[in-house]
Image (tube, helix red, strand yellow):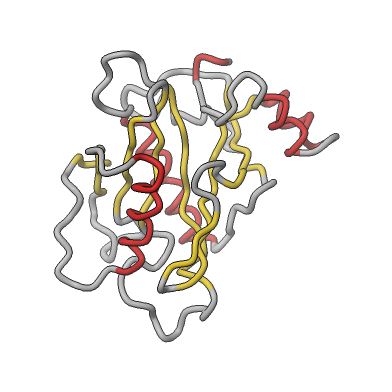
Amino acid sequence: MPDETPAPERELASPGWDAIDAALVAVYGPAPHQHVSYEPVAGEATNLAGCAAHDAGDHWHLVTYGLSELWEKQPTSHPDYSGWGLELTMRVPRADGDTQAPGWAFTMLNAMGRHIHATRAIPLAGHRIDLGRPVTGHPDVPDAPATGLTAFAVVEDPQLGVIDTPNGRLAFHQLVGITEAERAEMVTTSTEAVLARLAGASPLLVTDPARA
């Protein structure tokens, strides 16, 4: 379960964490943002170290911390990549007056992070992840809305892209909720073609449960 807390005080050097923060500051400036951690904490489980949600006006931009190396570079890790070489992002609608991103989005990003840690399967841009259930986690995730979005397509985050950190290369991969019909169309055409069509209505590919 996500637990809303301030970004943790870091006594140890955290060059990877700082690099993610710097990439977000370049987009959003030093504006305050919502941060959650997960219980049990990373290190005691395969949970992420945390997830941040930035106010992007008409949507929330969520970014994970914990699939890359946040602290010092580990001598046994790949020299060119930071951890798994990626962090996940997702964009979800924000209504006027909303002060907090929806809890289901934090929960599902952590679930995807745990899946990556457990299976060692890295979701690259162009991949599709068929959940066989709503992308919100409904009805198992508290307060998650029902939706016809049942799979994620993966695309490089259009604003964060790829960065170089002191711990190696890091790509931000955005999860985009799609319907079963859209997933099937991607199989016969391509993920990129269908996402390009969806971007006509939502240029930053916001995952809106009400869309389906």
Relative placement, left or right, of 178 versus 147 is right
The percent position of residue 28, horizontal first and vertical second, equals 35, 39
Residue 110 vertical placement versus 150 (above, below): below
Residue at the outermost bottom position: 75
Q: Determine which quarter of the picture holds residue 153.
A: top right
Relative placement, left or right, of 139 versus 157 is left
Residue 86 vertical placement versus 95 (above, below): below
Residue at 16% across, 46% down: 6
Q: How many marks?
A: 0
Relative placement, left or right, of 104 versus 13 is right
Quadrant of the image containing the N terminus: top left
Quadrant of the image containing the C terminus: top right
Residue at 49% across, 66% down: 164
Q: Judge by depth and name the residue closer to the eye, 128 or 206.
A: 206
Q: Judge by depth and name the residue closer to the eye, 110 or 168.
A: 168
The percent position of residue 38, horizontal first and vertical second, equals 26, 48
Relative placement, left or right, of 179 versus 39 is right
Residue at 44% across, 27% down: 92
Q: Determine which quarter of the picture holds residue 137.
A: top left
Residue 67 vertical placement versus 205 (above, below): below
The percent position of residue 44, horizontal first and vertical second, equals 26, 64
Residue at 31% across, 61% down: 18
The percent position of residue 15, horizontal first and vertical second, equals 32, 69
